[in-house]
Amino acid sequence: MCKQYKIPIYSILTGIILTLITGFFPNVFLIGITYWGYLLPWMSRIDYLGAPLEIIWINLLADIIIWSMLIYLALVSVEEEKMKTVKKKAVKIEPVKRKLRRRKR
């Protein structure tokens, strides 16, 4: 895998996984309707026995994009910090010049 595509692929996959995990947690409770998902509620169900779950696709897609962008920014900032520390450690060290002492005979 190319290094240039590593961070975007990881951020998209992590965004999808985080979005699906947030579907397990109830979000906003209105009278008669329950929503799931964070940042935007992307799954809803009317509160009666046997009611089907309804997926709000636009909110699901927006959640995936938002989580992916947040993870992307975090990964890029971590990579930049790593590069800064590497550059600091890679200071050019010049050899010490010693004066040669002539031995007396």
Image: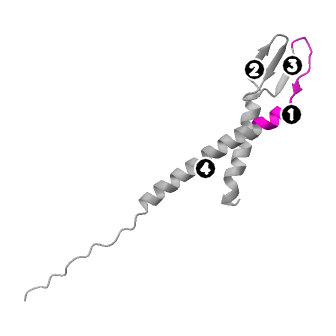
Question: Of the residues under marks 1 and 2, which one precedes in the sequence?
Answer: 2
Task: Classify 10 Å Cα crowding around label 4: few (below 14), some (14-19), many (20 and above).
Answer: some
What is the C-alpha distance between the residues marked 1 and 2? 17 Å
Question: Which residue is the site of mark 2?
Answer: 26
Left or right: 84, with 29 as reference point: left
What is the C-alpha distance between the residues marked 4 and 1? 28 Å
What is the C-alpha distance between the residues marked 4 and 2? 31 Å
Tag 3 near tag 1, CB within 8 Å: no
Task: Classify 10 Å Cα crowding around label 1: few (below 14), some (14-19), many (20 and above).
Answer: few
Q: Is residue 38 magenta?
A: no
Tag 4 near tag 3, CB within 8 Å: no
Left or right: 73, with 28 as reference point: left
In percent of the image, x 90 and y 11: which residue is there? Answer: 49
Q: Which is in the foreground here, disc 4 or disc 2?
A: 4
Query: In the figure, residue 50 lies in which quadrant?
Result: top right
Question: Of the residues under marks 4 and 1, which one precedes in the sequence?
Answer: 1
- Kindly identify which numbered label has been placed on residue 76: 4
| Disc 4 residue type (three-letter) | Val
| Disc 3 residue type (three-letter) | Arg
Name the residue furthest left: 105
Tag 4 near tag 1, CB within 8 Å: no
In percent of the image, x 43 and y 58: which residue is there? Answer: 88
What is the C-alpha distance between the residues marked 4 and 3? 38 Å
Q: Is the residue 95 above or below the residue 78 in the image?
A: below
Q: Does the magenta stretch include residue 48?
A: yes
Left or right: 97, with 76 as reference point: left
Q: Which is in the foreground here, disc 1 or disc 2?
A: 1
| Disc 2 residue type (three-letter) | Pro
Question: Which residue is the site of mark 3?
Answer: 45
Question: Which residue is the site of mark 1?
Answer: 57
What span is colored magenta in the figure?
47-63
